[in-house]
Image (tube, coloured by chain):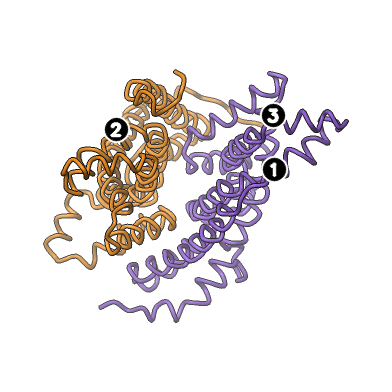
Chain colours: A purple, B orange
């Protein structure tokens, strides 16, 4: 009754188009996930630093940002961006732009918390020592605190990257042709939901599980301090 | 931005009752899925710490496979993929009793059960080994050790991470809109479709989610203080 041949006959569309985004549609899970991870982390660094700022006027907005996005479902944020950005810019935005914006804004709140925890894990004496040898505040951050903090953050960062990688499947809600949407499209034609969604699950699993195995190597490595 | 706000769409017509129904469905699916997730989490989390290898391997497979695949894929899998393989009677019953709700609830519960399992396992591993040894020395069987000593202590240790995981479950119930469960996000979209007032509708849904999450977090902070084990958790109130 089960027929896994449907995967072989649609392999190109599912993997080349849906997973890598190299087909005729503007889609692809990896084409969305990789920039979203990089940009989300960059924005997250700023938010994490802002949450630790001395001035309350920088700290408060960053705290509100984090609390807001952690209290709202990602699906809701995607719909917000989908409706708001075209209104603001007065021009239609492709699904890719909508999805990327939503993921970067949403995940930055989570990355920000990881960055904050990572920086707070660096002992205070390190900062004092850096100041004592004459580094400026920015130099202390760049040469002393961040290198150690990033090391401590790696396990949590990889976990968040896995979450983000899985979350990109939600871009299919607004019509972006990622791996999940590709499977939906094939299923509409072939009506083989069990085989197709199981295959998609295995592909996602192969990526996320290897990421988490890779991260475990860092966890075992003794930290610098 | 040239947008005419009209907040009255939220209380005129059917919007109010849609939002209320959506909220109730969200709470209902989340609560049922939460019970399933906690049950699966306790069983598999405990199994992963047991001395017998096949049990550990089975639980590890469940946890790793289910939490590493997107919830959306599981929604499609349980809603579109599994029912056609069920025997005729069960399938018919399911489609007469809101198959999307049950498939969504099951997907949510099984997915979060795997994540809850990790939380519970961490709690069990945080218990000093001597507790286990002391219980065995008292003459308890392995099952009794888990039921009477390990799991009750672990449950009290994990209140904070379990709360944040439960809130994730609540927020993730919004993914069920993809299989047309009429939960809160679904109803928000429905208001938007009928009134063409996206900002108002989305604001209403967003505020409800925020109030739910912030409210539950505040209640659980009190529970955490109430159930903290003196001397084991050094957390200020």
Of residues B198 and B104, the one nearer the viewer is B104
Would you call the spot at circle 3 few (<14 residues within 10 Å), some (14-19), or many (20 or more)? few
Quick one: B166 or B1, which is closer to the camera?
Answer: B166
| Residue linked to disc 2 | B24
**Tags 1 and 3 touching, CB below 8 Å:** no
Rendered image quadrant of residue B59: bottom left
Residue, disc 3: A124
On-image quarter of the C terminus of chain A? top right
Q: Could you tell me if the residues under marks 2 and 3 are in contact, i.e. CB atoms within 8 Å?
A: no
Q: In the figure, is residue B72 to the left or right of A70?
A: left
- Assess disc 2: are there few (<14), some (14-19) or many (≥20) residues with their C-alpha within 10 Å of its C-alpha: some
Tell me whether circle 1 and circle 2 mark residues in contact (CB < 8 Å).
Answer: no
- Foreground pick, B137 / A9: B137
Q: Give the residue number, with chain letter if any, for mark 1.
A: A148
Q: Earlier in the sequence, mark 1 or mark 3?
A: 3
Label 2 and label 3: CA atoms lie apart by 48 Å
Both marks 1 and 2 on one chain: no
Q: Report the residue that reaches farthest toward the left.
A: B89
Q: Nearer the viewer, residue A16 or B230?
A: B230
Q: Secondary structure at mark 2?
A: helix
Compared to residue B101, the image places residue B210 above or below, namely above
The numbered mark 2 sits on a residue in which chain? B
Task: Give the mark count.
Answer: 3
x, y percent for residue A213: 51, 60
Give the residue at x 33% y 20%. Answer: B226
Say which quarter of the image contains residue B42: top left
Please give the chain letter of the residue carrying mark 3. Answer: A
On the image, the x and y values in percent for residue B126 come to 39, 40
């Amino acid at each position: 009754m089960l027929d896994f041949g449907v995967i072989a006959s649609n392999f190109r569309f599912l993997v080349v188009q849906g997973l890598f985004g190299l087909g005729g549609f503007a889609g692809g899970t990896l084409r969305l996930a990789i920039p979203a991870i990089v940009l989300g982390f960059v924005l997250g660094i700023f938010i994490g630093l802002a949450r630790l700022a001395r001035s309350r006027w920088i700290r408060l907005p960053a705290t509100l940002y984090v609390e807001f996005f952690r209290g709202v479902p990602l699906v809701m944020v995607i719909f917000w961006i989908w409706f708001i950005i075209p209104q603001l810019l007065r021009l239609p935005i492709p699904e890719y732009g909508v999805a990327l914006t939503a993921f970067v804004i949403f995940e930055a709140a989570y990355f920000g918390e990881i960055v904050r925890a990572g920086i707070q894990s660096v002992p205070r004496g390190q900062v004092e020592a850096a100041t004592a040898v004459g580094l400026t505040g920015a130099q202390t951050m760049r040469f002393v605190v961040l290198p150690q903090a990033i090391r401590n953050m790696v396990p949590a960062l990889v976990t968040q990257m896995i979450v983000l990688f899985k979350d990109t499947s939600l871009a299919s809600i607004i019509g972006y042709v990622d791996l999940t949407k590709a499977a939906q499209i094939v299923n509409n034609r072939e009506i083989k939901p069990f085989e197709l969604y199981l295959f998609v699950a295995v592909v996602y699993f192969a990526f996320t599980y290897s990421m988490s195995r890779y991260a475990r190597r860092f966890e075992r490595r003794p930290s610098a301090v | 931005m040239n947008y005419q706000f009209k907040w009255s769409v939220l209380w005129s017509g059917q919007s109010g009752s849609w939002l209320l129904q959506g909220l109730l469905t969200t709470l209902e699916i989340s609560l049922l899925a939460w019970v399933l997730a906690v049950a699966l989490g306790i069983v598999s989390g405990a199994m992963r710490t047991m001395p017998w290898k096949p049990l550990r391997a089975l639980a590890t497979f469940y946890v790793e496979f289910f939490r590493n695949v997107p919830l959306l894929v599981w929604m499609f899998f349980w809603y579109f993929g599994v029912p056609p393989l069920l025997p005729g009677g069960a399938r018919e019953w399911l489609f007469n009793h809101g198959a999307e709700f049950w498939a969504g609830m099951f997907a949510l519960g099984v997915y979060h059960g795997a994540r809850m399992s990790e939380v519970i396992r961490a709690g069990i591993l945080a218990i000093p080994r001597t507790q286990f040894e002391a219980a065995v020395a008292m003459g308890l069987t392995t099952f009794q050790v888990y039921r009477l000593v390990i799991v009750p202590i672990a449950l009290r240790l994990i209140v904070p991470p379990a709360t944040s995981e439960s809130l994730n479950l609540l927020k993730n119930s919004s993914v069920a809109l993809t299989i047309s469960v009429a939960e809160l996000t679904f109803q928000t979209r429905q208001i938007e479709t009928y009134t063409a007032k996206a900002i108002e509708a989305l604001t209403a849904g967003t505020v409800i989610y925020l109030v739910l999450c912030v409210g539950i977090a505040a209640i659980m902070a009190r529970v955490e203080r109430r159930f903290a084990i003196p001397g084991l958790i050094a957390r200020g109130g």
